[in-house]
Amino acid sequence: MNENYIEKNWISGPRENKSDMLRYQQWFDSCRSLDECVANGVVDFTHKIFTKDLYEHLGDPRGKTSLEIGFGGGRLVNIAAKIFKKSYGVDLLDAGSILKTREFLATVGNTRNVELLNYSDVNKIDNESIDFAYSFIVFQHFSDISVVEEYLKLLKRVLKPGGVAKLFAKNIPEKVFIGRYQIQYNPEAQFLEIPPHAMKKEVEASGGERCRYSTLFIRPEHFKKMISEHFQVLD
């Protein structure tokens, strides 16, 4: 992955807020307290990610292994670690931010069965070692479609035969804004990448506060096509 301003924003934002745990969590999720952050994680993981229908494909998760793409502040991997025997997380956060997320996990749960990795260290995850992989409202913050392709290749390597992944992407809306600026695009486009300079312009205009704008949009039919090149699409 080539680091540009969008990636830099997602590295520098958490790093600049890690002196205060609540502010750190608020970079990733809208919450008014750490308790609310934990509760949001429970609701999202159990109602949107590891939903009842997945038991049909995966079975009992208690002896299995999970992987989160884009673990951020840790609110979802915190819940995964309570359900799965071993939980991995991968993100582009720097070492200091990863330590902050581990501090959060130690405060609200435990870190004994959690391993958090920077993307540069994903080779530490063995081939065909993951039963369930997921990514929730993360792909929409990538800089370009090639990042999605890289993660699909990662999943192809690490998922066990019969393993399952649940991935979320954001469709292209009728009007796309980065802050106050409307982005012009071809309405027939299958995906839309926000230019890094547009993100840079808005971050500088806003003073850099909570710049979590969506920067990658993918039509559902195109996303399905990308996934089907590597996997069987269940839904």
Image: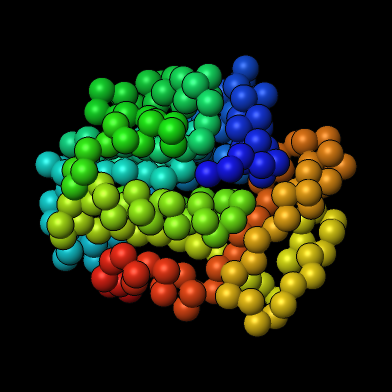
**Colouring used for the render:** rainbow
| Left or right of 151, for residue 27 | right
**Against 180, is 96 above or below?**
above
**Against 206, is 147 above or below?**
below
- Residue 126 placed where, x, y %? 22, 38
Of residue 168 and residue 20, the one placed in the foreground of this image is 168
**Residue 162 seen from this side:** yes
- Residue 10 placed where, x, y %? 62, 38
Q: Which quadrant holds residue 109?
A: top left
Tell me the quadrant of the picture where the C terminus can be found.
Answer: bottom left
- Residue 221 placed where, x, y %? 47, 78
Q: Which quadrant holds residue 111?
A: top left
Which residue is at a point 53% across and 44% down the rendered structure image? Answer: 1
**Residue 100 seen from this side:** no
| Left or right of 151, for residue 29 | right
| Left or right of 216, for residue 181 | right
- Residue 88 placed where, x, y %? 31, 36
| Left or right of 6, for residue 123 | left
**Against 125, is 202 above or below?**
below
Residue farthest to the right, as pictured: 205
Which residue is at a point 84% across and 39% down the rendered structure image? Answer: 204
Which residue is at a point 62% across and 25% down the rendered structure image? Answer: 15
Which residue is at a point 25% across and 58% down the rendered structure image? Answer: 164
